[in-house]
Amino acid sequence: MTSLPVAAREHVRQEMVADPRVVAAIVSAVHEQVPVYAALDDSRLPEVRAIAAWGLERLLDLWVTDGALEPSDLRRLRGIAAARAADGRPVQAVLRAYRVAATVLTDEIAARAPRLAAADAFALSRMLLTALDTLSEEMTTAYAATDEDLAADRDRALRLLLDDLIAGRHASVGALSDRSARLGVQLPDPYCLLVAEPVGAERPEMALDAATGLPEALAVPGVPGVPGDEVASSATVRGSRAVLLLPGAAAARAGAVLGARSWRGCAITGESLDRVAVAHRLAADALDTAPAHAHRPGRVLTDADAHVLALLGGHPAAAPDQVARLVLGPLTDPGQRHLMEALTAYIDAGSASAAARVLHLHAQSLRYRLRRIHALTSRDPRDPWQRLTLDIARTIRP
């Protein structure tokens, strides 16, 4: 069988480039067969489609012309590799994605030229093998160089990692562990995600300047995460807000540290490392919607505040019974029923004296129970905002 004339290969090329289903098939195959790509959020898929479209057109050009990758192609491949290394996408996964794409390309050509001559099939195989070999070498080299650069600038590497966590680009703890290992760090687990903003400030650069010193100020003596330890704290910015990933124990100091700097914030401690994006959204939304009286000197908003605000906004991130447990904590235990009764009476009656009369208690006994509620929940029933959260929690509790 004679080979296809150049014009026939060109026809196949034009047909495939013009058909958007080919790129869609490549992206779908990569998404299904490469777990790292399956975990990408929707914001990254347009980039994957753009690279697939470019790769498709270049490889078909090489097949039609019996050409080879040019220096401009190699520069682009190195740039793609550097970006993927900074994203934390393993080089093995990226190279596998290209192999999957090459398989789809071969299938699509075969479907359009069912009587492909041996010479054309050989030319296609040779082109793909040569291109994949060159691509592998270029990308591996670029990965190594980028890893060295990131390791040399540890703060920048950690900031990029936190940016990716916030954007939801890592959907598994395994991927996080691989990237952390390459950086030689260990992410705090349990962690505190603190989103904070300077009160009354409108200049975004203030958040960046102040964020650099907050991890050290929030470090707890004797707890992993102190500078110099293997556990890494990191900071980045979103608009005028600083976002910090800290050891979980740092949440206890957040209120005092931010208060001393005239900042306010929200500290989320109840989400897993693969849900940092959820934690950030909760905290940011809480700061957007919390009334002024929810912020008190020496105190930051917590998971419970954030979930109550989400519930009030009509977009709860947790079931009502979970929100109630977050706010009430130990008060949900059967052994604390007397404290729940005291809380209910106090909220309904409006004062300690009136609640004491309802429960046939001495007023001092009622006030003692209110102090116990404060100690167990970190929520003072006498504070208007905290009383509201307690009221909501006891109302929605099953």
Image (cartoon, rainbow, N blue to C red):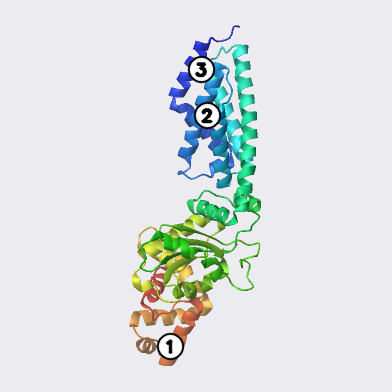
Residue 315 point in image, percent of width and height? 38, 57
The residue that appears at 38% across and 69% down in the rendered structure is 199
Q: Mark 2, mark 1: which one is toward the viewer?
A: 2
Three-letter amino acid code at the position of disc 1: Arg
Residue underneath mark 2: 55
Mark 2 or mark 1, earlier in chain: 2
> Is label 1 in contact with label 3 (beta carbons under 8 Å)?
no
Seen from the viewer's position, the closer of residues 393 and 164 is 164
Helix, strand or loop at mark 3: helix
Q: Are marks 2 and 1 in contact (CB under 8 Å)?
A: no
Question: Which label sits on residue 112?
Answer: 3
Disc 1 secondary structure class: helix
Task: Tell me the quadrant of the picture where the N terminus can be found.
Answer: top right
Disc 1 marks which residue? Answer: 367
Q: Where is residue 333 in the image (x, y as percent from the top left)?
A: 52, 75
Q: In percent of the image, x 43 and y 88: which residue is there? A: 367
